[in-house]
Image (spheres, helix red, strand yellow):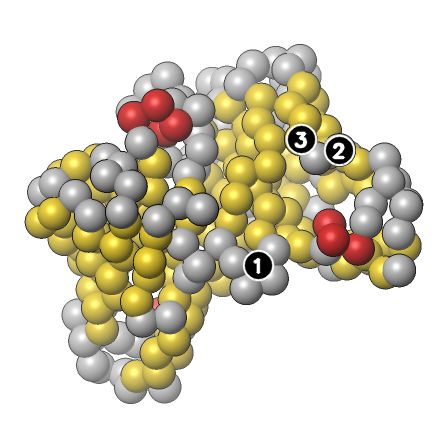
Amino acid sequence: GDSVTQMEGPVTLSEEAFLTINCTYTATGYPSLFWYVQYPGEGLQLLLKATKADDKGSNKGFEATYRKETTSFHLEKGSVQVSDSAVYFCALSFLDTGRRALTFGSGTRLQVQP
Amino acid sequence: DAGITQSPRHKVTETGTPVTLRCHQTENHRYMYWYRQDPGHGLRLIHYSYGVKDTDKGEVSDGYSVSRSKTEDFLLTLESATSSQTSVYFCAISDRDRVNTGELFFGEGSRLTVL
C-alpha cells in the first residue's frame, strides 16, 4: 500500500538556521504531496502542496519540490524562527481518483531555540 | 478558523466501556474524517464520510464504528474500549472544492485514555 516515510525527530535548530526535513513516499502511481504543520495544542493545518512532478510548493518561507525520480518531497526553509517550532507531517493523496483520503507520515518535531 | 468542534476534548475511561466521540461542524462541508494520532505512526485514518449516511472504513477501522445522520455531525464509537485505543483522535472536514486539492481542516483533537 501507499506509505510516507519521514526523518525521525526531534530536529533542534538555532534561530536563523537552515532547515531540511526529509520525506520520501511509496505509491502506485503519481500522488499529490503535502506538508501539514501542527502547532502545540492544535490540529493540523495545510502548509504547502504539489500536485505533479517538478512542482514546487511554497508558503510562509517554506518550500518543497516534488521529485518523481527520487520519490521525495523534502521540506526546506532558509531561516527558521522560534515560532516555527511544531510537528511537521508529510502526506500523499490521489486527488483525481476515489482515493482522496490523505496518508500521513509519522511526523517530525522541530524545536527552534533562540 | 474552520468551525469544527470535537467533544469531549479529554476523556478517561475503563477497558470494556463504550465511548462516543463527537465531531460537529458549522461549515456544511460534505466530507468528514476521523484520524487517530499515535507516536511513531503519525495520523492514521479510521473512518470517513462523503455525505449523510455514506461512510467507509479507513486503514485502522477495527473496533470502531461511525454514524452520520446529519451533515454537521460525525460520531465515532468505540463499542468496547481497549487500552490499544488510547490515543488522540482528530476530526477533519473538507468541501467539494478543497477535497480536490487535498486540503483538510482539522479539529483540536480529543485525547482518550483507556485504563
Judged by depth in the image, the label closer to the viewer, 3 or 1, is: 3
Q: Which of B20 and A47 is in front in this view?
A: A47
- Relative to A29, residue B54 above or below: below
Which mark, residue A114? none
Q: In which quarter of the image is residue B85?
A: bottom left
Q: Is B69 displayed left or right of B46 in the figure?
A: left
Q: Which amino acid does label 1 sit on?
A: Gly
* Residue wearing tag 2: A61
- Residue A26 can be seen, yes or no: no
Which mark, residue A59? 3
Check disc 1: other Cα within 10 Å, few if <14, some if 14-19, many if 20+. Answer: few
- Relative to B81, residue A95 above or below: above
Gap in angstroms between the C-alphas marked 2 and 3: 5 Å
**Contact? badges 2 and 3 (CB < 8 Å):** yes
Q: Mark 1 lies on which chain?
A: B
Residue A83 at x, y percent in the picture: 74, 53
**Contact? badges 2 and 1 (CB < 8 Å):** no
**Labels in figure, total:** 3
- Relative to B91, residue A2 above or below: above
Q: Quadrant of residue B103?
A: top left
Q: Is A29 displayed left or right of A58 in the figure?
A: left
Q: Mark 2 lies on which chain?
A: A
Check disc 2: other Cα within 10 Å, few if <14, some if 14-19, many if 20+. Answer: few
* Residue wearing tag 1: B40
Q: What residue type is labelled 3?
A: Asn
Residue at 42%, 61% in the rendered image = B109
Gap in angstroms between the C-alphas marked 3 and 1: 26 Å
Q: Mark 3 lies on which chain?
A: A
Identify the element where label 1 is drawn.
loop
Identify the element where label 2 is drawn.
loop
Q: Which amino acid does label 2 sit on?
A: Gly
